[in-house]
Amino acid sequence: MATLEETVTGAQIVAEALVAQNVKYMFGIVGIPVIEVAIAAQVAGIKYVGMRNEQAACYAASAVGYLTGRPGVCLCVSGPGLINALSGMANANMNCWPLIVLAGSSDTNQETMGAFQEFPQVETCRLYSKFSARPSSLEAIPNVIEKAVRTSIYGRPGACYVDIPGDFVNKSISTSDVRYPDCCLPAPISLADTFEVHKALQVLKNAHQPLVIIGKGAASSRAENSIRRFVEDYGLPFLPTPMGKGVVPDNHPNCVSAARSSALKNADVILLLGARLNWILHFGLPPRFQENVNIIQVDICAEELGNNVKPAASLLGDIDAVTKQLLEHQRRTTWKFPSDSSWWKDLRAKIKANEENTNALASQTSLPMNYYTVFHHVREELPSNCIIVSEGANTMDIGRTMLQNYQPRHRLDAGTFGTMGVGLGFAIAAAMVTKEQSPEQRVICVEGDSAFGFSGMEVETMCRYNLPIIIIVVNNNGIYSGFDEDTWAEMLKSGDPESIAPPLSLKPNAHYEQVMTAFGGKGYFVRTPDELQLALKQSLAEKRLPSLINVMIDPQSDRKKQEFHWLTRSNL
């Protein structure tokens, strides 16, 4: 009697191929033709999180890649579903975060016929990814997925796309016909040229006003131990980029974040560790930098070396490995930048002056509160090991200076692409990772009211999966600024809002906390420091449900007068 041959579907092959590559998280929105892929992923042991928008799903999957070093997966439907995910792919590529996007597509026998949601998906994704391919058969799926995962983490990390035709999902083949490649090896570690290392150290030792800039590439490289030792052994001041915060703790005595503009403008030698001379660092050009500043550039990507400024030394390689090379050479010398130098004295004086200005703003007792008062009280309550997610304009920029990070990869924000709408997706990703790795660790998502609007419905996702994320909406009734209720009402007497309301304005005193309570989470509407402190304490005590604290501030509240405003085009 003949025995039935064991078979496997395309959906099951996709899931098992991902498991074979040690992929653990999938975020998405299901529909025809990918429902079975999500189910198969869960059966195979992958954690699936159903989101409310493909953009947020893709942001979440990319954040997993940054936090864990292994790509998360964004699963979406064909056509419009994939198009919604493109912003997440572009954001991952700009941030250099590993990501896999899987999307269903039209059946192979319906191509060019006007099939349901037919779209040139593979071709489109090539613009937003490192690798984009459609497997030619079910047997080819494991190899394509292995290459996508490997490509996403090798070299400069980024997004990769795998297209799954609809007729592949439920089609079956014999189990014996499928071969799953072994899990790809970790990314190769490359070292810098020894001559360039010597040259870099010579340039550094001749510096009168040196500065180390730590970028998120250093965080991705897991270089925190070597970099901390480097700045301490050499006695160098360091400045983190927004997501480089925490590679060396913000409260380290060598951190000069509070003197950022002065440090950049006056440094004569700058060592870039995984940071790019893009808009965030004013391209390394005057007037933000000295005309003849010597740049020592350490980067994993050869094409990045020399962008905008010709470097005095180019060190191509893994940030952690190259930093260890620099440390190895330091052991042969007793050189250390003097802590009593005029450079250190100038930086410390500037730090003191800026901190005094900030503290004066934070201590104001007038109502409505300003940004600095809010962040002062938030900072007082936050656990030191929490992951901070932040987006908005003033909310993100002022929060970056006032909310401290003490550990690497503990800050997620709009990043290199300046993307708004990432916050809640990032927070969900961080909560999923901490749920498995460190259940007591908290995720704090600090949003401007405008930024919250991009993906606010993801609070339902948080409630559905019992993720105790704390969202703090700093509400100024607008984009950059808004109006109070009385001014808004008076203005509307003059005409319809579409004709007279300034484009920056939003509805005054919107109760965003009610969006959270509608799905069973905790919501707080606060106007005073005491109410804010109480809401924070209660939210931190809640271990199962998410919370949203809607903090009303002065609609005209702004940053302190300063030289640097990283989101203002005129200052770039």
Image (spheres, rainbow, N blue to C red):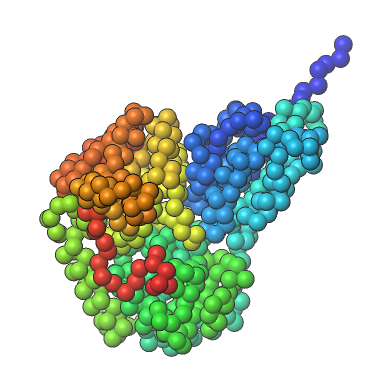
Provide residue 371's location: percent of width, then percent of height.
Answer: 25, 56
- Identify the residue shown where x is 31% and y is 45%: 507
Front-most of residues 399 and 497: 497
Q: Residue furthest front?
A: 494
Q: Residue furthest left?
A: 365
- Identify the residue shown where x is 43% and y is 43%: 455
Provide residue 18's location: percent of width, then percent of height.
Answer: 64, 40
92 with respect to 204 (left or right): right
- Identify the residue shown where x is 45% and y is 49%: 422
Front-most of residues 455 and 233: 455
Q: Does residue 214 sit above or below 197 in this rendering?
A: above
242 with respect to 402 (left or right): right
Provide residue 25's location: percent of width, then percent of height.
Answer: 54, 39
Q: Does residue 40 sit above or below 361 in this rendering?
A: above
Look at the image and tell me whether residue 186 can be seen.
Answer: no
Front-most of residues 159 and 502: 502
Front-most of residues 347 and 185: 347
Q: How many marks?
A: 0
Look at the image and tell me whether residue 425 can be seen.
Answer: yes
- Identify the residue shown where x is 37% and y is 54%: 503
Q: Does residue 148 sit above or below 278 in this rendering?
A: above
Q: Does residue 22 sit above or below 308 in this rendering?
A: above
Provide residue 441's location: percent of width, then percent of height.
Answer: 35, 43
On-image quarter of the N terminus:
top right
